[in-house]
């Protein structure tokens, strides 16, 4: 029996049955268009050979599109009503036993997942999208690639190159783990309720080799946070608190790293920040 997808009417019926009113707090804008969820799965290049983790499956529209490929899915859902219903929805749509595992937890608190997932696919709400992505990249090194749907503002920042207007701490921290790119746009009309912001797809691939040790990552991220705490501030000032306690001390460290003390955080790449952390 082939896996079938949810339609808009069934999604609304499921929500009514569960007494789920989409809330802004949890970012519950449910995707009601089959073509869109298949577009996300195609962009992520999911095949039956992959092991997928999905964050925030909601009522299951994207979940079923992933399962349609034959790939097993581990779905992490914070709303216990949705987590409890998802297996029944999957079974009713032709998903074989054992293909779906539901973890009813806050994604930001999950530190272990069954099945060692290698692909991440998700529709992430604005308020937690960056923290969730960084958390999963940190804690699950088996994840090699993925595609997430996020608000356009978040996606553009994640994929931004150094020097661009939206480049910031999330851009640099994401780059620690690999390369990120915009992978498509998503119409507002495919959501219920219809949001008042645009959404995009962001694809990523983890670097083959780790960029540094955990200690180096923590130090690099602390330097990144300081550099972007006050935008357009010279690094010798912005980093004085984390590089010796004074502008002069920070200037010495920056010089050793080959970075101009008068540069600004917006100009630096992840490689620059790592050199500063190691200097």
Image (cartoon, grey):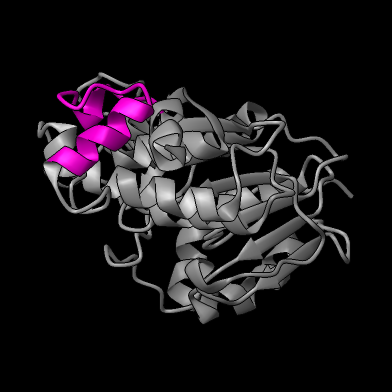
Q: Quadrant of residue 205?
A: top right
Residue 6 is at least partly visible in this image:
no
| Residue 90, x across and y down, in percent | 73, 62
Residue found 54% across the figure and 62% down from its top: 59
User: Of residues 134 and 146, which is closer to you in this image?
Assistant: 134
Indicate the quadrant where residue 83 lies: bottom right
Query: Magenta stretch containing residue 128, yes or no?
Result: no
**Which residue sits at x=75%, y=45%?**
118
In the rendered view, tell whether residue 150 sits above or below residue 204. below
Quadrant into which the C terminus falls: top left
- Indicate the quadrant where residue 101 lies: bottom right
Instruction: Depth check: give the residue in front, 144 or 127.
Output: 144
Q: Provide residue 214's location: percent of width, then percent of height.
A: 57, 54
How many numbered callouts? 0
Please tell me which residue lies in front, 116 or 71: 116
Q: Is residue 84 visible?
A: yes
Asked if 174 appears above or below 117 in the picture, the reply is above
Please give the name of the residue rendered at 77% of the width and 62% of the height, measured from the top-left corner: 100
Magenta residues, start to end: 248-269
Q: Position of residue 193 (x, y in %)?
A: 31, 53
* Residue 89 percent location from the top left of the image: 68, 66
Q: Is residue 48 left or right of residue 221?
A: right
The stretch drawn in magenta includes residue 264: yes
Is 124 left or right of 121, judged from the image as shown? Answer: left
């Amino acid at each position: 029996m082939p896996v079938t997808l949810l339609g808009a009417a069934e999604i609304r019926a499921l929500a009514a049955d569960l007494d789920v009113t989409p809330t802004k707090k949890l970012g519950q804008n449910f995707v009601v268009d089959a073509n869109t969820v298949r577009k996300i799965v195609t962009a992520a290049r999911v095949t039956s050979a992959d092991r997928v983790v999905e964050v925030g499956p909601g009522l299951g529209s994207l979940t079923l599109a992933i399962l349609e490929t034959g790939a097993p899915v581990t779905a992490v859902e914070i709303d216990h009503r949705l987590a409890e219903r998802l297996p029944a929805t999957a079974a009713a749509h032709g998903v074989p036993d054992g293909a779906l595992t539901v973890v009813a937890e806050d994604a930001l608190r999950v530190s272990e997942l069954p099945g060692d997932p290698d692909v991440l696919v998700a529709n992430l709400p604005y308020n937690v999208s960056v923290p969730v992505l960084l958390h999963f990249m940190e804690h699950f090194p088996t994840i090699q690639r993925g595609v997430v749907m996020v608000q356009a503002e978040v996606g553009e920042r994640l994929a931004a190159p150094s020097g661009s207007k939206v480049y910031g701490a999330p851009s640099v921290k994401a780059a620690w783990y690999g390369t990120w790119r915009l992978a498509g746009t998503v119409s507002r009309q495919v959501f219920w309720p219809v949001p008042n912001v645009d959404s995009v797809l962001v694809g990523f691939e983890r670097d083959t080799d780790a960029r540094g040790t955990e200690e180096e990552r923590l130090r690099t991220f602390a330097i990144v946070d300081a550099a972007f705490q006050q935008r357009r501030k010279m690094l010798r000032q912005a980093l004085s608190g984390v590089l010796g306690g004074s502008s002069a001390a920070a200037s010495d460290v920056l010089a050793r790293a080959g970075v101009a003390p008068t540069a600004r955080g917006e100009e630096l790449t992840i490689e620059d920040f790592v050199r500063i952390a190691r200097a």
